[in-house]
Image (cartoon, rainbow, N blue to C red):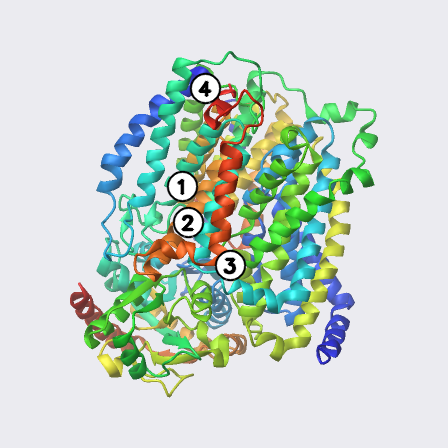
Amino acid sequence: MVEILPMMAEGFQNAFGWANMGFICVGVTLGIIFGVLPGLGSVTALAVLVPITFYFEPLFAIAFLVGINKGGTSGGAIPAILINAPGTPEAAATALDGYPLTKKGKPEKAMKTALYSSVCGDTFSDLVLICLAAPIAAIALRFGPVEFVTIILFSFTMIAALAGKSLVKGIMAAALGLFLSMIGLDPVDSTERMTFGTLELFEGISVLPFAIGTLALGSVISQLFDMREKPQEDLGEKIKSVTNYKDDNRLGFFEFWGTWKTILRSAFIGTGIGMLPGLGVTLAAFLGYGSAKKASKNGDKFGTGEVEGIQATEAANSAVVGSNLIPTIALGIPGNVAAAVLIGAFIIHGVVPGPLMIAEHGVLVYSIFASMLMANVAHLIIGRLGINIWAQFVRIPKAVVMPIVILLCIIGVFIPTNSMFEVALLMIFAIVGYLMRKSGFSIVCLVIGFLLGENFEIYLRQAILMNNGNLGVLFTSPIAVFFMAMTVYFTWHFGFKKKKPKNTTDSQKSASAK
Amino acid sequence: MRKTHIGTALFFIPVALICVFWLIPANTVPPTSADDISPRFVPTIAMAVIGFYSLILLIREWRAPKPEDGELDEEFGAEATGVDARVLLNTLILLVVSALTWLGMNYIGFEPTMTVLIAVVMYYVGARNWLTIGLCAVIAPIVLSLCTFHFFSTELPGFWK
Amino acid sequence: MTRLDRRAVLGATVAAVALMGGMTAAKAEYPEKPVTLVIPYKAGGSTETMARVYSKALAKELGANVVVKTRPGAGGAVGASEVAAAKADGYTLLFAASTSLMWPPLTQKVSSDLDSFIYVGQITEYQQAIVAKADAPFNTMAELIAHAKKNNLNFADQSAMSRSYINFIGGQEGVKWTGIPTKGGGEMVPFLLGGKVDFAYSGGIHQKYGDKMNVLASFQAKPLALAPDAPALGDLYGVSQLGNAVMFAPAGLPDDIAKKLHDAGKAALDDPDFTKILENIKFPKTYVSSEGLVELATENEKALKAMLEATK
């Protein structure tokens, strides 16, 4: 411990330079802009900007990229709140409570809540990373396919929380997502599955056109049709006419911190998901939202514009950003796609993430840690200034904004792959999204089924192969047993526990949805 | 919503049957290792779940139709109106416009196609200010295309490129 | 269509025609317009990053802009098919691992194979190996085989191809082990270090783990440049995986353009930025000319086919 302190001091000192500060601020700003543009988002931003950073100093490059990752993860909340078109799948649950707030004339309040929750979650997870990277990484190594299968099984019970009263429809949507995720080459045998010989489908349906189509483009299209069919109250006009706009959009100290438990819970969930390689930001967001909906006494009001719903989602998805560097820095294993791109960036600068990194580049590692904390401050300030700008967008007529959003969705899907096939997928899923919206089938459940499906299958099959066809191992690993017990408890809790005397079973409970 | 549920169920029950008994077996290959579960396993379960719950949805709506109590959908609120003739017509429009946009973007190019698309969409939703429509339709595609090229070094399709 | 719409379309068309005219002005010497370098993998990986830096060096040598285009899908086959179908005029090139072109045609219906391309040159070699945890009960290939004869072992592979190779070796030695599919090095490492598998195929990621991982054998024809003590599968079993990053062009390229590309491609390797990045990602600079590559590839393809036959 003693020899770490001077290293830490030197590292922090290096980070507090004007140049580094500049790179962080530019990174955060770019990240927010990328996140705001639907279809782009932090992964695209990182992948595209990594080659540019090759020509920077290592610390600046990494600080810049870390800033992008932070800004990008929170930026996705802005279009979700303002136009109900989540720029990234992890912001899907943000739209559920964010957009209703905008409709009530409180867009700035929603954006402030999102930003502050993001920064809180992010800072929490950065601190965990800085203080506990090594011991936690050792725990992460104990997680294998067996443990992951049970975590995903447990996550599936969240569908019940998210589907609420329409449980039957939620399960159908999730099953459809699961089925769609199975298309492509079989992960074990590399034989074709429902690809019909289409080369573009060999690696499965890409997440990007799927998520952007169902979540963002589908919503935009639905709104366009509504605009045609019934004269809409123009939000811009409405907001201009609201006399107490300023008061309405004030976010009181107690209003935000009164639900500190939700923020802490979500930050904890996000940090936990982030440190386990292969699970991902979106899962954290949904778990955060789902658990808050069940645990909070306002849970029933989620979806109508509850500040707490935004907090639950945004604190969880941003908390992934710091902690997914735990396996990256301690083991050299990417926590998710964004971290994988970051590893690439580390390596081209001659810094090899992994067990040797702290020994070989200790000062740099602490400079990066310091930069992460600085980036959180920058994020808070830049994000807060940005809200004033984004709020103006609500005043632009929707007839102008929406067509441009369509173009952004198309471009965002086209950029990473240069593929018109992906554009076609985007359009198909937009139609699916539109129909699901109209018929009340949960898109959030569809997306969860899709994102978890592929991992569920591969982990299950890995677990079975590793144990020569024996599934008894699911009951020998303590971690697995813990999550199995949680799964059983939650299934019971959501499915069979009586809340009101009238709704005795889940099927009747969902029958009350019209 | 009742009609929508019955319609969805009637649509998914045959789809699930076709998938489970024909599409999935015809388009997957049995596993090579005896310890492995079949590549068919998870897709079949997914489709079976869809079929099973469609049946439940159908039976429930058939036997005990709940009165429309005006309660809003939890995820979509008033947006979830149920699928009626109007929504089906919109879907048809959507299909045609999507297909034309895709063909136009692929064979003609991004900028001209999107110019037309923006103008049509803006007119469709009720914009009648020709200056606004014209400016948006011409400037937005070109600016976005230039940005894509310079910031992402990605060239959007165009026959002249 | 209304008046203004028509005007807008007209304007765009005029602009388009003007642009087109500017580009096909006069026929000059190659290259007279930007060259597109297709990378058939997702952005952010080591091959893609390498190719982006290499493209800058190549641009300097060619005297024209080189635009990198990622076209991922089907383990490289989507991008490869696109380049195979492109005009053979030297303006569309492919930067890929040669196995991405060799393996799909052998096992799947794809529209391109090695004959659809000509080689421009090999840029570098991947450091593929069979690795084990440092404290594993075996430290060499021979000890691994001896251990496997007494125990049930699992190994992590990263593709059907790497699994075929290891199963082929098992068949030769009369041992049976189980391949656990992983989604690449990022998943293999925790499995190996966490003791979920006994040994693993590594595409080069083991170099990041210093003394925590042991190289048991090189997956290639010759021992690895960075682990010369471990034997090579090529020497032990007569099979090996061609692990190299190669620049390809569609077949039918005119000779003068091919020569120019060949020279520029070779000279670009000495670019200081590119040299630095190869050093950082610990890839050796191993240039092989197109003639040498043809020989290597034919040999390897033959071995691959024989191996596929044997493991069927």
How far apart, in angstroms, are the residues tagged by discs 3 and 4? Answer: 41 Å
Q: How dense is the environment of label 2, judged by Cα within 10 Å: few (below 14), some, or many (20 and up)?
A: many
Q: How dense is the environment of label 3, judged by Cα within 10 Å: few (below 14), some, or many (20 and up)?
A: many
- For mark 4, what is the residue? B83
Is disc 2 in contact with disc 3, using a CB cutoff of under 8 Å?
A: no
Task: Kindly identify which chain the residue marked by label 4 belongs to.
Answer: B
Task: Kindly identify which chain the residue marked by label 1 belongs to.
Answer: A
Using the rendered view, name the quadrant where residue C159 is placed. Answer: bottom left
Same-chain status of marks 2 and 1: yes
Locate residue A329, reporting x and y percent: 58, 68
- For mark 3, what is the residue? A277
Q: How dense is the environment of label 4, judged by Cα within 10 Å: few (below 14), some, or many (20 and up)?
A: many
Tell me, for residue A456, which label it has, or none: 2
- For mark 1, what is the residue? A178
Q: Residue at x 45, y 70 (%)?
A: C62
Say which of A78 and B82 sits in front.
B82
Give the mark nearer the N terminus: 2 vs 3.
3
Give the mark nearer the N terminus: 1 vs 3.
1
Tell me, for residue C265, which label it has, or none: none
